[in-house]
Amino acid sequence: MEIKRDRQVQTIYSLHDARIKKIDINKDTVVLRFDYIFSYVNKEEQTYKADIIFTGDFSCDVLVFDNVVGSGKNNGFSGKLFKFEEFVKKYNPLDFEVLTEAYHGYSTIFEGLLYVNENTFTCMMSFWNDGEVIYKIYDKKNSQNY
C-alpha cells in the first residue's frame, strides 16, 4: 500500500524508534528503507515494514556529531556536515534510529542516533523535496492494545 503524505495534515505514522537500514538513491527518487514504522489506530499500536520515498527535486544535509549530544563527553558541539551522497557512500547500509521527526512545508528533519560498529553518534538529517513523500507500507509486523 502506498500513502502520499499530505503536507497539510499530520500523518498517522510515527518513525520514533524506527531504524533506517538502507538508503537507495535512484534517478527520480530517494528511498529510505526502515525495519518498521508505527501507527496508532483505535488505541492499538501497529508496526509495519516500510519505505519512505522522496520524489521530485531533492536535497539533504546530514550532521554527524562526534558523540552523543548530552552524554557529558564534551561541552561543545563537534562533528561533520555531509552532503547526502557523501553520507550514503560512507555509512550505507546503515543503522540510524529516529528519535525525533519534524515536518514543515517541503522540509523533513530526522534527529536520532547513528550506530557504527561499537560507536554511537547523534545524527541529524535535514531533507528538502518539492515532490511527493510516499509511505510504502508492507505487511503488518504485529499489534498491541493500549
Image (spheres, rainbow, N blue to C red):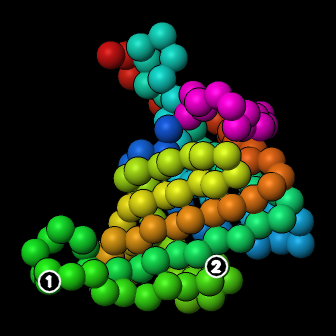
Asked whether 74 or 97 is in front, the reply is: 74
**Residue at coordinates 67% horizontally, 46% vertically from top-left?**
105
Q: Quadrant of the C terminus?
A: top left
Question: In the image, residue 41 lies at what x, y percent?
Answer: 51, 17
Please tell me whether residue 9 is drawn above or below residue 5 in the rendered image: above
For marks 1 and 2, give the CA distance.
26 Å
Image-based side of 14 in relation to 30, left or right: left
User: Quick one: which residue is furthest to the top in this view?
Assistant: 42
Q: Which residue is mark 1?
A: 74
Q: Which residues are magenta?
A: 1-13
Label 2 crowding class (10 Å Cα cut-off): few <14, some 14-19, many 20+? some
**Residue at coordinates 83% horizontally, 71% vertically from top-left?**
26
Quarter assignment of residue 128? bottom right
**Residue at coordinates 58% horizontally, 75% vertically from top-left?**
61
Q: In the rendered structure, which amino acid carries the disc numbered 2? A: Phe
| 139 in magenta | no
Image-based side of 89 in relation to 1, left or right: left
**Residue at coordinates 60% horizontally, 54% vertically from top-left?**
108
Q: Which label belongs to residue 84?
A: 2
Q: Nearer the viewer, mark 1 or mark 2?
A: 1
Asked whether 90 or 110 is in front, the reply is: 110
Please tell me whether residue 46 is drawn above or below residue 67 in the rendered image: above
Label 1 crowding class (10 Å Cα cut-off): few <14, some 14-19, many 20+? few
Residue 118 visible in this rendered orientation of the protein: no
Q: In the rendered structure, which amino acid carries the disc numbered 1? A: Asn
| 3 in magenta | yes
